[in-house]
């Protein structure tokens, strides 16, 4: 279901509940992602497509130092110690 076009119901620009509305867009830096706002649903084909959108490489550079940690998602790593 979330891979189907039916899942695009809330992927619109309508206030206050559209995921692409101006209020929601204040929380996302859309310049970091490959999106085309001229297309319906900005080119996303489904809810899952929206949540796995491609990011521009320059938006999140990878730290090349050998002592750095590269985290695989937009979240904070949690460390409990050893």
Image (cartoon, rainbow, N blue to C red):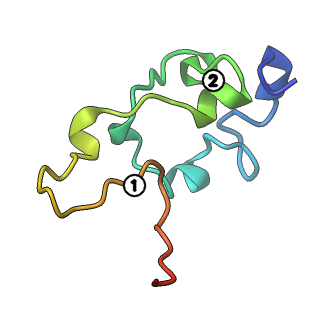
> Is 2 situated above or below 23?
above
Position of 37 with respect to 31 (left or right) is right
> Is 4 situated above or below 71?
above
Q: Residue at x 34, y 40 (%)?
A: 32
Residue 28: mark: none
Tag 2 secondary structure: helix
Image coordinates for residue 15, horizontal then vertical, percent? 71, 48
Q: Find disc 2 in the rendering and name its residue.
A: 41
Q: Residue at x 44, y 25 (%)?
A: 35
Position of 57 with respect to 37 (left or right) is left
Tag 1 secondary structure: loop
The answer to which of marks 2 and 1 sits earlier in the sequence is: 2
Quadrant holding the N terminus: top right
Q: In the figure, residue 21 lies in which quadrant?
A: top right
Give the Cα distance between marks 2 and 1.
Answer: 29 Å
Residue 71: mark: 1
Judged from this view, the residue extending furthest toward the bottom is 81
The answer to whether the residues at label 2 and label 1 have Cβ atoms under 8 Å apart is no
Q: In the figure, residue 67 lies in which quadrant?
A: bottom left
């Amino acid at each position: 279901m979330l891979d189907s076009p039916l899942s695009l119901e809330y992927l619109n620009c309508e206030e206050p509940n559209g995921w692409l509305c101006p209020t929601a867009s204040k929380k996302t830096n859309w310049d970091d992602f490959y999106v085309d706002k001229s297309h319906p649903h900005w080119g996303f084909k489904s809810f899952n497509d929206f949540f796995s959108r491609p990011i521009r490489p320059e938006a999140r550079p990878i730290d090349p130092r050998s002592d750095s940690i590269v985290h695989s998602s937009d979240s904070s790593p949690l460390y409990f110690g050893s």
